[in-house]
Image (cartoon, rainbow, N blue to C red):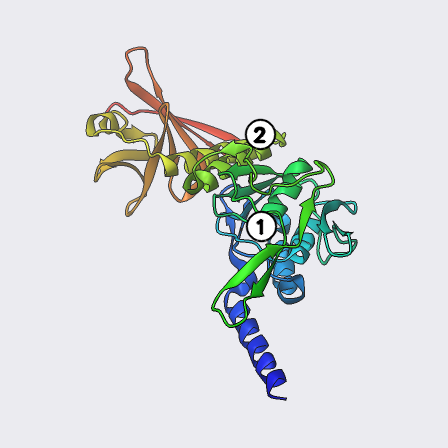
Amino acid sequence: GRDGEQRAEEKSDMQAELRRFNYGFRKLEMLEGNVGYLRLDAFIDAGIGGATAVSAMGFLAGADAIIFDLRNNGGGSPSMIQLITSYLFDAPTHLNDFYIRKGDRTKQFWTQAHIQGQRRAEVPVLVLTSGRTFSAAEEFTYNLKSMKRATIVGETTRGGAHPVQRFQVDGYPIAVSLPFGRAINPVTGTNWEGTGISPDIEVAADLALDTAHLEALEMIEGATEDPARKQQLQLARARVKVGIDPIELDASQLQDYAGLYGMYRIAVLEEALVVYADQDLTLPMTPIGDDGFLVEGMGDVLVRFERNDDGEVIAVSSRHHGIEARYPRSRE
């Protein structure tokens, strides 16, 4: 009848809306140093958004660390939490229980036994939170925090752990949300209702991404033995740091470095230091402190100037993929 048609129409409108929202998956990126980043603004039912989740986790499969950004996430469905979290554990893992008052029953949530793609049980995970992170987004965060599977970076979350049902009041334009149960974490035996979840690293929400990125680079560096990879990660950290807080050098400080070094000419151009790679190509150099510079467009090169006892710059050395070269300054 008419009611059924209306419901079907509402359902297809709702699904179109969710598709345009990309099921909550708002941003997917590989950050400097091979750190994967996913901004997820809602946990949409896995029956609807599951394929998008699987492809997002496939994109992150080669990352050396993963950041989940839940700063704008107001919650959603436990089935999506279950699906994404299943990628982060090897063995089936008990995530959360919901105690439902009606019928006095407890519903358990475990990671899935089968997933598409590869599990990343060893990869460092960081979760970004804000005062707006709520409900299912808090459950995702709390599950990983209580199992020590993630580092939480940002602000204390909003604090809603009771699943609620909306009741429309007949004849009035108001609806009441009433809790019908509560979350019980298998590790802590409690939940985050009213208190929210406090982060491991407390920082204003707008600084959380840079803070977590630096933290992730440090974690990866701590786990690697390869000196060339270590240098890459140190440079990645330096780039993120100067991106947050650039080092400003005045004209006379820059002029100290200008000169001819072997076949390379370094000069001050428009209040910045540049190296002439050939006649018409100049590469800007970014100061990272202690006479060290990054060269734009040359990702893994670290350039360091050398001074004599009088403080005059006498040479420059470059390190690239573990290979070192030193160029004395010509006396022009």
Out of 108 and 295, give the one closest to the viewer. 108
Identify which residue is drawn at 22% across, 36% down. Answer: 271
Q: What amino acid is labelled 1 in the image?
A: Ser
**Tag 1: Cα neighbours inside 10 Å, few (<14), some, or many (≥20)?**
many
Seen in the picture, residue 243 relative to 39 is either above or below; the reply is above
Q: Quadrant of the N terminus?
A: bottom right
Q: Is residue 273 visible?
A: yes
Q: Position of residue 223 (x, y in %)?
A: 63, 31
Q: Which residue is mark 2?
A: 227
Identify which residue is drawn at 28% across, 30% down. Answer: 260
Out of 219 and 290, give the one closest to the viewer. 219
Tell me: 300 left or right of 294.
right
Q: Quadrant of the C terminus?
A: top left
Identify which residue is drawn at 79% across, 45% down. Answer: 91
Q: Is residue 63 visible?
A: no
Secondary structure of the residue carrying tag 1 is: loop
Tell me: 72 left or right of 107.
left
Identify which residue is drawn at 60% across, 79% down. Answer: 7
Q: Which residue is mark 1?
A: 135
